[in-house]
Amino acid sequence: MNASLAYSSVFLVVATLSVGSPAAAHGPSGHHETATAAQDEEAMKAQHARMENLEDAMVALNNAVIHGEKTDAGKHAVRLTEALKGHEKDTPHKNVSRVKEFQAFYGEMKKRTAKLAADAGTGNLRNTSLSYGRVLEVCASCHAKFRD
């Protein structure tokens, strides 16, 4: 098995496990019960819509990398950075008293997606994959503390 194919296979497994589980958790689930009264239903719907946009961009980026589509990988990495807009005002679903920590994850996500977009812009799919994995680390960590 060549190194490129092996790396793509590992990337597919990691991306599927990391993106599928946390991002899929944004459907209706009753998790709103722990949110503060200030976080009304409209704000939560908007937050879920933003998370859906993030998920869509991540899945599209994953597919572009797996299929070796450098141009599409760059396009979807930029789309991912754009999908972050608006998240700076979001609040967690649980552990709502830890908003500053939640916002720190947003800051880290913003940095890592910028690096991802830069790497994808070079057309180097290996570096793009590595940067994408670093973005997924933030997703999984944040969801473990504030969502799941």
Image: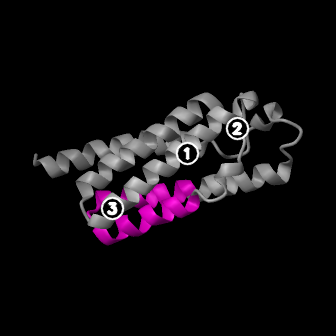
For the magenta stretch, what is the residue range? 54-83
Q: Quadrant of residue 36?
A: top right
**Colour basis:** one colour
Q: Residue furthest right?
A: 37
- The residue shown at (47%, 49%) is 111
Q: Which residue is mark 3?
A: 120
Counting residues from the start of the chain, the first of labels 1 and 3 encountered is: 1
> What amino acid does circle 3 point to?
Ala
- The residue shown at (82%, 33%) is 33
- The residue shown at (80%, 35%) is 35
- Crowd band around label 3 with a 10 angstrom C-alpha radius: few (<14), some (14–19), many (20+): many
Indicate the quadrant containing the C terminus: top left, top right, bottom left or bottom right. top right
Counting residues from the start of the chain, the first of labels 2 and 3 encountered is: 2
Q: Is residue 121 left or right of residue 45?
A: left
> What amino acid does circle 2 point to?
Pro
Q: Secondary structure at mark 1?
A: helix
Q: Is residue 86 left or right of residue 39?
A: left
- 46 or 18: nearer the eye? 46
- Crowd band around label 1 with a 10 angstrom C-alpha radius: few (<14), some (14–19), many (20+): few
* Residue 135 vertical position relative to residue 84 in the rendered view, above or below: above
Estimate the x, y position of residue 143 in percent, counting from the top left.
Answer: 58, 35
Report whether residue 25 is seen.
Answer: yes
Q: Which residue is mark 1?
A: 107
Q: Quadrant of residue 69?
A: bottom left
* Residue 144 vertical position relative to residue 58 in the rendered view, above or below: above
Distance of mark 1 from mark 3, alpha carbons? 20 Å
> What amino acid does circle 1 point to?
Gly
